Image: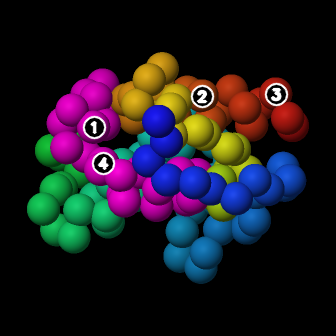
Amino acid sequence: MAWFRRKQRAPRSAPPPRPGEPAPAGGAEAILEDLCRAIVEQSDGSLTREQIDVAGDLVGYGYVDSLTAATLLERIEERYGVEVSELDLVGRLSTLQALADHIRSEISASG
């Protein structure tokens, strides 16, 4: 069951990064750091980058809940042009490392 309903959108290329943010292009490590930064930002100060285990389960470790998952998925789609379903986020892409690898793979396949 989905946590929320998202409006279907046509695929699009990733927009330019916001001022002060690194470009989303790069290897899986750059993407991984961007995802970690997103988790820290969403935690409102309760997490630091050093506390995040990139191999830890996003939901199991409490990094995301239904609301923050929706925000993270939106960020991924906006920054990278990659759509990830909420089922994938709690299934095969349930760690930040798996998510970063998937995003990099999708970018490589489309580019």
Q: Residues within 10 Å of mark 1 (few under 14, many from 20)?
A: some
Q: Find residue 14 and report its image quarter.
A: bottom right
Q: Is residue 94 left or right of residue 106?
A: left
| Residue 47 covered by magenta stretch | no
Q: Residues within 10 Å of mark 4 (few under 14, many from 20)?
A: many
- The residue under label 4 is which amino acid type? Val
- The residue under label 1 is which amino acid type? Val
Label 3 – label 4 distance at C-alpha? 27 Å
| Mark 1 vs 2, N-terminal side | 1
For the record, the magenta segment spans: 54-76
Q: Is residue 83 visible?
A: yes
Quadrant where the C terminus is found in the figure: top right
Q: Is residue 69 above or below residue 103?
A: below
Q: Residue at x 48, y 20 (%)?
A: 92
- What kind of colouring is applied to the model shown? rainbow
Q: Is residue 35 above or below residue 89?
A: below
Q: Residue at x 47, y 36 (%)?
A: 1
In the picture of the structure, the residue carrying the numbered disc 2 is: 102
The answer to whether marks 4 and 1 mark residues whose Cβ atoms lie closer than 8 Å is: yes
Helix, strand or loop at disc 4?
Answer: loop
| Mark 2 vs 4, N-terminal side | 4
The nearer-to-camera label among 1 and 3 is: 1
Q: Is residue 31 above or below residue 67?
A: above
- The residue under label 3 is which amino acid type? Ala
In the picture of the structure, the residue carrying the numbered disc 1 is: 59
Q: Residue at x 53, y 76 (%)?
A: 20
The answer to whether marks 3 and 4 mark residues whose Cβ atoms lie closer than 8 Å is: no
